[in-house]
Image (cartoon, rainbow, N blue to C red):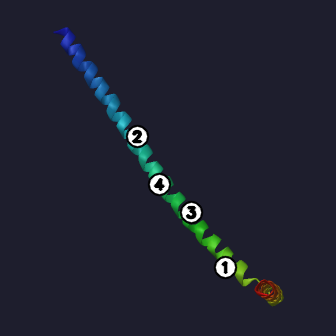
């Protein structure tokens, strides 16, 4: 009879330990979910900032830089046309 009472008491103690562990894990999960949500918000903010910086970089191209790029492209097209005409001969 005493062994049975001892076993029941042991099981009750184990149950109490498991319940407290379960509560601890639930609290930890809630904390991790909160952190995850904060990290997602930070990620979204950084993605937006990155897109804004990319847009700002495109918009910061000056007229002289654009003219240089157009002239360089025109020169390359002329060279390609010359090469094609030489190949056709």
- Tell me what residue is drawn at x 71 percent, y 84 percent: 59
Q: Which mark is residue 55?
A: 1
State how far apart marks 3 and 2 are (Cα). 26 Å
Q: Which residue is mark 2?
A: 25
* Mark sitting earlier along the chain (1/2): 2
* Mark sitting earlier along the chain (3/2): 2
Question: Which element carries disc 4, helix, strand or loop?
Answer: helix
* Mark sitting earlier along the chain (3/1): 3
Q: Where residue 48 sits: x, y (%)?
A: 59, 72
- Tell me what residue is drawn at x 84 percent, y 89 percent: 64
* Mark sitting earlier along the chain (4/3): 4
State how far apart marks 3 and 1 are (Cα). 18 Å
Q: Which residue is mark 4?
A: 34
Examine the image and state in which quarter residue 6 appears.
Answer: top left
Using a 10 Å C-alpha cutoff, classify the residue at mark 1 as few (fewer than 14 neighbours), some (14 to 19) or many (20 or more): few
Question: Which element carries disc 1, helix, strand or loop?
Answer: helix
């Amino acid at each position: 009879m005493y062994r049975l009472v001892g076993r029941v008491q042991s099981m009750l103690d184990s149950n109490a330990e498991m319940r407290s562990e379960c509560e601890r894990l639930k609290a930890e999960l809630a904390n991790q979910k909160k952190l995850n949500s904060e990290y997602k918000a930070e990620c979204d903010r950084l993605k937006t900032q990155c897109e804004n910086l990319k847009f700002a970089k495109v918009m910061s191209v000056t007229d002289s830089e654009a003219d240089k790029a157009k002239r360089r492209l025109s020169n390359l097209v002329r060279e390609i046309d010359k090469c094609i005409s030489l190949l056709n001969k």
